[in-house]
Image: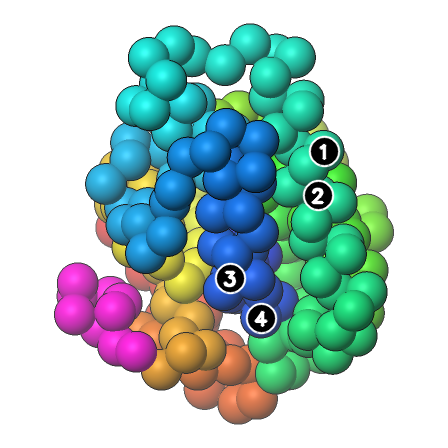
């Protein structure tokens, strides 16, 4: 087994679902609470996860933090909106080009991998299943585990240490958002960017290595190997 743990975000990194998520999230709060979030800047909130955003939005607009029961209602409504959308648009959920092939390549070549997403677990699993990304027997942390993206990534690492029976000193995270970059900087974990939308948002904030998809495995492996050899 390799000594470096490779952790992946899901939305916008393994699946092309970020814009759909935004639409359903806005619709959830409009229909449940009459809160308009159209064209909202998620990055202004302290925790850009399904749970964290729900906490912040309710507090900002209604002046209180949601209860566990409130969160359960929000999660179920959001999940059903996504599923309804995807069932009407059967091509709406697709993998980022080459994502599953890349994951299977890493597994075959003894790279330990994990998933860490700010999405609710039930929705993340639905997207992975629908986009035919094989994720069984991979350590997995989600917004069900914590409202903080930093904590979610830390939980994914803890689960990986247990699952692989190894304490990882070297890690890489694949992500697509500004909040991924902030989290990685906080935890001192290198970020490899995925820019499916080709909007250069990661380039603008200084992420050094960015790919549009996973079609060129050889080039991505070169970057991984650079971090493997890093002795700092």
| Residue at left offset 59%, top offset 76% | 96
| Residue at left offset 38%, top offset 68% | 193
Query: Which residues fall within the magenta stretch?
Result: 199-208
C-alpha separation, residue under disc 4 versus residue under disc 1? 21 Å
- The part of the image, by quadrant, that contains residue 8 is bottom right
Q: Nearer the viewer, residue 50 or 24?
A: 24
Examine the residues drawn in magenta and state their main secondary structure.
Answer: loop
The 10 Å Cα crowd at callout 1, few under 14, some 14 to 19, many 20 or more, is some
Q: Is residue 207 magenta?
A: yes
Residue identified by numbered label 1: 76
C-alpha separation, residue under disc 2 versus residue under disc 4? 17 Å
Tell me which numbered mark, 3 or 1, is placed earlier along the sequence: 3
Q: Nearer the viewer, residue 110 or 189?
A: 189
Dots 4, 3 in contact, CB < 8 A: yes
Indicate which disc residue 79 carries: 2
Tell me which numbered mark, 2 or 4, is placed earlier along the sequence: 4
Dots 2, 1 in contact, CB < 8 A: yes
Q: Is residue 25 above or below residue 90?
A: above
C-alpha separation, residue under disc 3 versus residue under disc 1? 18 Å
Quadrant of the drawing holding the N terminus: bottom right
- Image coordinates for residue 101, horizontal then vertical, percent: 71, 78
Tell me which numbered mark, 4 or 1, is placed earlier along the sequence: 4
Residue identified by numbered label 4: 16
Dots 2, 4 in contact, CB < 8 A: no
Residue identified by numbered label 3: 18
Q: Is residue 163 above or below residue 87?
A: above
The 10 Å Cα crowd at callout 2, few under 14, some 14 to 19, many 20 or more, is many
Q: Secondary structure at mark 2?
A: helix
Q: Nearer the viewer, residue 196 or 192?
A: 196
Q: Is residue 212 above or below residue 54?
A: below
Dots 2, 3 in contact, CB < 8 A: no
Q: Secondary structure at mark 3?
A: helix
């Amino acid at each position: 087994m390799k000594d470096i743990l490779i952790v992946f975000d899901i939305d916008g990194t393994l699946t092309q679902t970020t814009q759909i998520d935004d639409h359903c999230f806005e619709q959830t709060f409009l229909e449940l609470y009459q809160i308009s979030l159209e064209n909202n800047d998620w990055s202004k909130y302290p925790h850009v996860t399904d749970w964290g955003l729900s906490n912040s939005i309710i507090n900002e607009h209604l002046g209180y933090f949601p209860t566990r029961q409130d969160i359960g209602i929000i999660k179920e409504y959001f999940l059903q909106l996504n599923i309804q959308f995807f069932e009407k648009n059967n091509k709406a959920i697709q993998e980022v080009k080459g994502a599953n092939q890349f994951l299977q390549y890493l597994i075959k070549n003894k790279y330990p991998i994990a998933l860490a997403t700010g999405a609710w677990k039930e929705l993340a699993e639905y997207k992975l299943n629908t986009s035919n990304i094989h994720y069984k027997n991979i350590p997995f942390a989600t917004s069900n585990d914590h409202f903080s993206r930093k904590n979610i990534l830390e939980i994914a690492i803890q689960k990986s240490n247990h699952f692989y029976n190894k304490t990882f000193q070297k890690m890489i995270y694949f992500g697509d958002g500004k909040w991924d970059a902030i989290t990685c900087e906080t935890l001192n974990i290198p970020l490899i960017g995925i820019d499916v939308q080709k909007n250069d948002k990661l380039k603008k904030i200084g992420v050094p290595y960015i790919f549009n998809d996973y079609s060129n495995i050889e080039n991505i492996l070169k970057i991984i190997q650079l971090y493997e050899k890093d002795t700092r």
